[in-house]
Image: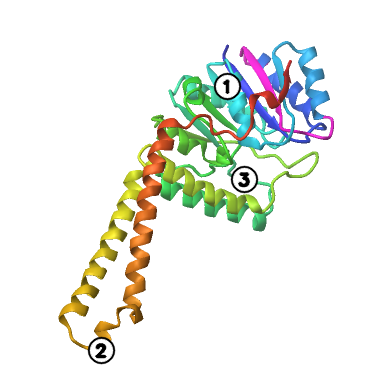
């Protein structure tokens, strides 16, 4: 199979028939063998009925449903697990991503041998104040921390070599940083392609301003997991050791003052700010060291970190 098209969705029933017809047209015209995987992330507007109807009409279309809303990352992770194509295309269901971009993305993976191609919506139809400016700031921050030179990390329209999606796990809210996850997994041929951004035709956006706060926190998580995910003691242990040594050195100085410096102030150790600073640094050092030790144990025994359970999917058609 040439491509698997993975489409997570939430309350997009109006756009789904038009999107499905457009995808069939593109795949047929370009002689691409395909499958379309719709993942309903707990919709309440009849989206499930729509995609099950589409899957009955077209044997190449699959419908997966979550019992409740788990988020885009969980939906993508399940879609990646189900995908069988040599190239996996992800896109949103709101018709703001154009299916006409699929052949170009496919060719860059197959013929130019990229591992991952991210879409770049160079010309956008979103609000400048609430979306464009914050997105530019987050893209700049992600570039700086990851070293990956992409203009639009959060673009839903992406193409992956099959090996990439089978080697990574997307959980929490990490869908924004899949290129970073792929890089940490050893896939370094990451590029981008300018893609069309279309104005929303149906419904409203499902993401609020809180996504920017969550996005920044997720970026810190990705950075930490990439650098220290398999060796947390190298982070917590070093900080804990430095804090403990600084506290211990301060304690020795206070003892020296009390024993060898015969002043009234030097004898009243507990009245000195340095006493409490030393005590705090000793406690923090021990806590950080224990955090690193526990992190090492968890990293060697942890299983699936996704927040959903496979039993929560009602069915696959």
| Between 230 and 16, the one nearer to me in the picture | 230
| Disc 3 + disc 1, Cβ < 8 Å | no
Relative height, residue 240 to residue 66 (above, below): below
Based on the picture, tell me whether residue 277 belongs to the magenta stretch: no
Q: Helix or strand or loop: what does disc 2 sit on?
A: helix
Q: Residue furthest bottom?
A: 264
Front in this rendered view, residue 124 or 153: 153
Other residues around mark 3 within 10 Å, as few (<14) / some (14–19) / many (≥20): few
Could you tell which of marks 2 and 3 lies nearer the N-terminus? 3
Which numbered tag is attached to residue 264?
Answer: 2
* Quadrant of the snapshot with the C terminus: top right
Q: Secondary structure at mark 3?
A: loop
> Which span is picked out in magenta?
29-46
Q: Residues within 10 Å of mark 1 (few under 14, many from 20)?
A: few
Quadrant housing residue 8: top right
| Viewer-side label of 2, 1 | 2
Q: Mark 3 against mark 1, which lies toward the viewer?
A: 1
Q: Position of residue 17 (x, y in %)?
A: 80, 25
Where residue 262 appears, x then y in whole percent?
18, 86
Please state which of residues 13 and 301 is positioned toward the viewer in this rendering.
Answer: 301
Q: Nearer the viewer, residue 158 or 232?
A: 232
Question: What residue did someone put label 1 on?
Answer: 81
User: Circle 3 is placed at which residue position?
Assistant: 123
């Amino acid at each position: 199979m040439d491509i698997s098209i993975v489409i997570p969705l939430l309350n997009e029933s109006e756009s789904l028939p038009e999107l499905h017809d457009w995808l069939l047209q593109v795949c047929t015209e370009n002689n691409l063998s395909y499958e379309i995987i719709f993942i309903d992330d707990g919709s309440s507007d009849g989206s499930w009925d729509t995609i099950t109807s589409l899957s009955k009409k077209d044997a190449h279309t699959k419908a997966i449903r979550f019992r409740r809303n788990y988020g885009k990352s969980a939906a993508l992770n399940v879609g990646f697990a189900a995908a069988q194509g040599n190239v996996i295309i992800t896109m949103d269901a709101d018709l703001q991503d154009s299916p006409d971009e699929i052949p170009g993305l496919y060719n860059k993976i197959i013929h130019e041998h990229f591992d991952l191609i991210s879409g770049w919506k160079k010309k956008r139809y979103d609000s400048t104040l609430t979306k464009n400016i914050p997105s530019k700031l987050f893209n700049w921050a992600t570039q700086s921390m990851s070293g990956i030179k992409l203009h639009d990390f959060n673009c839903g329209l992406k193409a992956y070599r099959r090996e990439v999606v089978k080697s990574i796990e997307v959980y929490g809210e990490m869908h924004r940083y899949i290129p970073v996850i792929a890089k940490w997994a050893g896939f370094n041929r990451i590029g981008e392609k300018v893609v069309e951004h279309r104005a929303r035709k149906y419904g409203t956006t499902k993401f609020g301003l809180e996504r920017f706060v969550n996005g920044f926190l997720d970026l810190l998580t990705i950075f930490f997991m990439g650098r220290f995910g398999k060796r947390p003691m190298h982070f917590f242990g070093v900080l804990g050791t430095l804090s403990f040594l600084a506290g211990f050195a301060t304690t020795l100085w206070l003892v020296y003052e009390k024993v060898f410096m015969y002043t009234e102030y030097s004898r009243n150790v507990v009245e000195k700010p340095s006493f409490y600073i030393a005590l705090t640094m000793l406690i923090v050092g021990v806590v950080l060291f224990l955090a690193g030790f526990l992190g090492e144990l968890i990293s060697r025994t942890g299983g699936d970190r996704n927040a959903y359970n496979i039993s929560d999917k009602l069915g696959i058609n």
